[in-house]
Amino acid sequence: MDIVILAVVIAVVAVAAVSGLVVTATRRKKTPPPGRPAPPTVTAPPPSEPRVGEEAEPPGDEGRRTIEEVDLPPAGATDAAVVEEAGAPAPPEVPGIETPEPAAGRLVRLRERLSRSQNTLGRGLLTLLSRDHLDEDTWEEIEDTLLTADVGVAPTQELVERLRERVRVLGTRTTAELRALLREELLALVGTDLDRTVHTEGGVSAEGVVRPGVVLVVGVNGTGKTTTTGKLARVLVADGKSVVLGAADTFRAAAADQLQTWGERVGARTVRGPEAGDPASVAFDAVKEGIAASADVVLVDTAGRLHTKAGLMDELGKVKRVVEKHGPVDEVLLVLDATTGQNGLIQARVFAEVVDVTGIVLTKLDGTAKGGIVIAVQRELKVPVKLVGLGEGADDLAPFEPEAFVDALIGD
Ligand SMILES: Nc1nc2c(ncn2[C@@H]2O[C@H](COP(=O)(O)OP(=O)(O)OP(=O)(O)O)[C@@H](O)[C@H]2O)c(=O)[nH]1
């Protein structure tokens, strides 16, 4: 038994000795001989993250910043700046003050909109006048076309009479001759020698105080009065003028916010009063602010509730009187919605009785085939159309130019 145990022990020791030699030999083979460069090895990618039980990577050389060392963004810095510094893409910029389009030439730019909506008038007239035989029925159709476009009864009759006469004298007619003739006659009706300047000159008071130009914007609510005031501010800013806005339409709460937004877009301050407050007091404060800030122009948006003529007269009359304590009002612009046709004319009449309207703004001319209202309203009030609204865009208010207007009516 002892001999068996001894034999087993010797065998185990012998096996262990042999396997130890093999391992050592293998290791020796892998170690490069001294003085020779090691052969290139492919290094496995480092483990992406420490495995359970392993130590996390020690921090690098960069010292840790204490909270005091972290630079804080300057007061008022936007989140965008902070994000940008962190290397992330900046969110879109907060819009700053806009640069409105220059007013000159706007009607030409917007001519397309005008001609699109006025085709029935200009093209219709040309087609009728081009007929081989201009009989009574055709003349009646011409008259109807003019009346449908809201040119008004008296101007329509005048125009038809003039055209009849001139066509008769002309004899045979080419399209070019007819177009020239129609252009001339329409221009005569629209008027080329009226003063269409929006007066914003201001002046100097008896006490030597320089005061800004003051413009009152009046009209029935919904005609585009507030929008027009905002757009007009842009026209003036585009012409290099500084503007203060007066939100005297205290009747509709949102109107003051709306006006203020228009003003902010072009850097114009808006003076506003308490909701349902006294419009005259807001208008007075706006002009006062305009004087204090040495602004060039103060635009006052008024409320236009047409419940009773007496009420309107009280309100608008008071606004005007109170503002005039600072000096004369330079311009009273009546805003009319061109799409309302005869209704617009009735409104115009009432307003003209209440205040001295000095200029007309016709809005929404882009959405109606009734461009003839330009002629009718000027006739009615004996006041020129000074501006026209041709869309909802911020710069879609254009100084009225008779030639560009008539050309848009007739088309090329
Ligand atoms: N298509 C078109 N829309 C216009 C024009 N002018 C104004 N509008 C639109 O008419 C609507 C009424 O405009 P407002 O300026 O709010 O009317 P408002 O007369 O001030 O009305 P209140 O604020 O209630 O007094 C708005 O949706 C304007 O965008 C224009 O020339 N063309």
Image (tube, grey):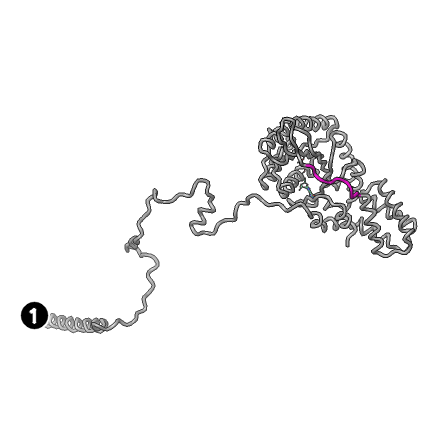
Query: Does residue 50 show up?
Result: yes
Q: Amino acid at mark 1?
A: Asp
Tell me the SS state at disc 1.
helix
Q: Residue at x 52, y 49 (%)?
A: 92
- The stretch in magenta equals 190-199
Q: Residue furthest left?
A: 2
Q: Nearer the viewer, residue 31 or 140?
A: 140
Find residue 315 and report its horizontal and vertical position in percent: 69, 27
Q: Does the magenta-highlighted stretch encompass residue 281? A: no
Which residue is tagged 1?
A: 2
Instruction: Report the side of 146 relative to 313 (left or right).
Output: right
Find residue 213 and report its horizontal and vertical position in percent: 66, 34
Find residue 163 and report its horizontal and vertical position in percent: 87, 48
Q: Does the magenta-highlighted stretch encompass residue 191? A: yes
**Rendering quarter of residue 292:** top right
**Rendering quarter of residue 380:** top right
Find residue 216 and report its horizontal and vertical position in percent: 68, 33
Q: Residue at x 74, y 26 (%)?
A: 310
Local crowd size for mark 1, using a 10 Å CA cut-off: few (<14), some (14–19), many (≥20): few
Q: Residue at x 67, y 36 (%)?
A: 201
Instruction: Report the side of 122 relative to 259 (left or right).
Output: right
